[in-house]
Amino acid sequence: MRNETMIKKARNLLLALLLALLPIAAQSGPSGQALAFTCAGCHGTDGSSVGPSSPSIAAMDPDVFIDAMDAYKRDQRNSTIMNRIAKGYTDEQIKAMAWFFAKQKLRLHVQKTDQQLVELGKQLHDTHCEKCHEEGGRAGDSGTLAGQWIPYLDFSMQDFIEGRRPYPRKMKRKVDAAIEEQGEQAMPALIHYYGSKH
Amino acid sequence: MTILGETPPPGFDPVTGKRIIPNKRCLKCHGDAHEKTDTRDDGSIVDIYADPEIIKDSVHGEQACTNCHATIDRVPHRQSPEVVVGCVECHRETWDMHRNDPDEKYERLGVVMETIDAYYDSIHALPNKHDQSETNATCYDCHDAHNVGTLGSHQRDDHRLKNPEVCGECHREQLNNYRESVHGRAVLEEGDSESAVCSDCHTTHQIASPGTDQAKLAITKNCGDCHEEAQRTYFDSYHGQVHRLGYTNTAKCHDCHGSHEIKGEDDPTSEIHPSNRLENCRVCHENANDNFLTFWPHGDADDREKYPGLWFFKMFMQILILSVMAFFWVHVVLWLYREVMDRIQGKGFIEDLSRPDVVYFRRFPVVWTWIHALFAIATMTLILTGTTLLFSHTGWAKAVVVFLGGPEMEGVIHRTAAVIWLGIFLAHLTIAINNIWRNRGSFKWFGSTSMLPNWKDWEDLKSMFRWFLGRGERPEFTHWTYWQKFDYWAPFWGAAVIGSSGIMLFAPEATAIILPGWMFNIATLVHAEEALLAAIFLNSVHFFNVHFRPERFPMSTTIFTGKIPIEEFKHDHRLEYDRLVESGELDRHLVRRPSRRADLAASFITTVLIMSGLALLTLVLIGVMTKPI
């Protein structure tokens, strides 16, 4: 009788210990926030970039973040080092970072822009781009354009146009239409327009 | 929900982590009236427009787009999205939640549940022949869910007028035919929402393959929702009677009028235009000749102006039925009253228990016994099978036809019984004429055993009424009383009317060689009316006179034993009895009482026939009383 009680007590204690350890086991890896800190070197503190060639990823739409990381992992997107970095993360870790950055406030810097180009860019944006890149290209499910560094925008567009990055069919159609409308001015105009946002 | 300590960002569901897509985001592209289409990868154009105002105004106006378009998780869509909308599940869940909700706005959801069930039983819910993974049609193929209105709303009016176009998306040939029809012109050209659209005939959800009985019956019923008069007169015809029993082997509305391409009588391309009509008749009546064209498919015996002949025959038959029945029912009631009164006073014919019947009078030879038995069975069979058509509106008629194996089998039985009936009638005539011929030397046309009515019958009738009213003695009769003579002669009239009309209807194509088509209308009418008279008369008046009056109750078996107790004969046929005694002929007619077995057999068959007759009378009266006017 007494033995049985002892056994039960021991069993319950073991169960309690196991339960107490479970969350630790589950969170044994670094948190999403901790993982995200390592991005600061290039993408700035909490994802607001200070350099001309790395984009800001603060407030980025999490699915756009995940798509980008997946594309780097599979070498489908032109990169310098991101394809090597991306391969080091699990899907879960990428999603956790995506959620972390999505919640960060995007801090923008004033860039030097050509006012004429900005105005032309606005006009082109409103006609061709606004439906997908809502509110002048603010962060959304089509990526973040507003306030990105002009050189980054420029490289990215070249990647699209020159086939180094998967070019969405609809986007190509719209870009082609903008170029047809305004010729060589079209791309600089749009880039200056987005770069003018802060 | 958390992943590595991170919770979902704003714009994502905190519990499921799924993206929340506001309707505004969807309508940015889909609500742009300037760009209503998009181009697919394969270059085809797709309509992507959904009018935001219409959505707002619909019953689904408050719903999030993604509640129905549940597969959409990214905007802009990364790939051409699959349009998968699950209407049923959502409606079921909502109904389960609000089933007992007193708020009236949820009431309609119950109807939606019924229509869902009906849809699942319909041909539209079956797998598509060309692609088994798809149904033939699903909710949103017909319902424009962005524009669903409540009962009586303007959306419903719009849908009604659009109905042919919606169905025509798949049923193109039918739509093209419909466009040419009177219905199609009214709806599509004049915007007349009162005229028939697809769903008026085919129903909305219980749609069956047009080859099925279910569809044919539904379509004919639905035509009648607008064309009430046409349906009423159709149901009076043989075509309609069979149809109303639930069978589709006779002509239905669309067999003669056409279906989608239906047009007026005056249109030369109409199926009912006189120059095209015969072709329709010949689908069933292969050898139909021009006389078929004079048949009135919607002949109305109540329409004196249009069908005076039919009207006259109906009036004549109804007056006949009413006067015969009125006279004889009064006769029955007064007779019953008199015999009951006599019985109370200890008068009338009472069996003397101390002197049991031993001596009997031979009233019928064996041949008449057989003739009467066969005649009775044939008549009852004819009544049963015939009245199912006349009273095709009743439940019993439908059950009887199912029991007999359908209208074709019923037709075979009816015609067989009719041949037997006429055969017996002719056999009887032959025997009777032969008897007269053999006794031509001594036969007296108005002798005491003659069936011919005479002046005494008239006197007897008057005396009977005096006796009924207590103003005289019961008259004394010869070998046959006047009511027996009436029973005897009535079938001659019946045979003439029912027989001749029946023969005409027996083989329509042969009849039409010599008679015009409208004779079928008259034949159908008088055949039914005369049969009705016979059915009611035989099973009430004849039964009372022979079996149910107190002196005879519960029955007389004389017709089957051929013998009547001598005391009873003396009471009912006193004059003949006296004549036979006087002439010394009585002994020649006296016989021993029937054997116990013969007596039981006669009682048995009489009981069966009486019970059958009463059952038929009940069915007929149910039919008469419930017949739609």
Image (cartoon, coloured by chain):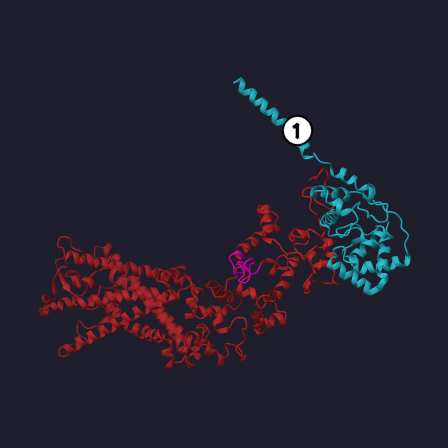
Residue at 58 percent across and 58 percent down: it is B138
A15 in the magenta segment: no
Residue at 76 percent across and 62 percent down: it is A173
Give neighbour class at mark 1: few <14, some 14-19, many 20+ (Cα, 10 Å): few
The one of B407 and A104 positioned closer to us in this rendering? A104
Q: Quadrant of the C terminus of chain B?
A: bottom left
Q: Amino acid at mark 1?
A: Ala
Q: Position of residue B317 (x, y in %)?
A: 37, 72
Q: Is residue B23 above or below residue A103?
A: below
Q: For residue B587, which quarter of the picture?
A: bottom left
The one of A93 and B195 positioned closer to us in this rendering? A93
Image-based side of A109 in relation to B272, left or right? right
Per the image, the residue denoted by label 1 is A20
Query: Would residue B120 be seen by someone viewing this image from the given angle?
Result: yes
Chain whose colour in the figure is cyan? A
Q: Position of residue B52 (x, y in %)?
A: 71, 58
Q: Colour of chain B?
A: red
Q: Is residue B201 above or below residue B515?
A: above
Q: Position of residue B133 (x, y in %)?
A: 56, 57
Magenta part of the protein: which range?
Answer: B119-137
How many numbered marks appear?
A: 1
Label 1: which secondary element: helix
Image-based side of B291 in relation to A40, left or right? left
B126 in the magenta segment: yes
The one of A190 and B216 positioned closer to us in this rendering? A190
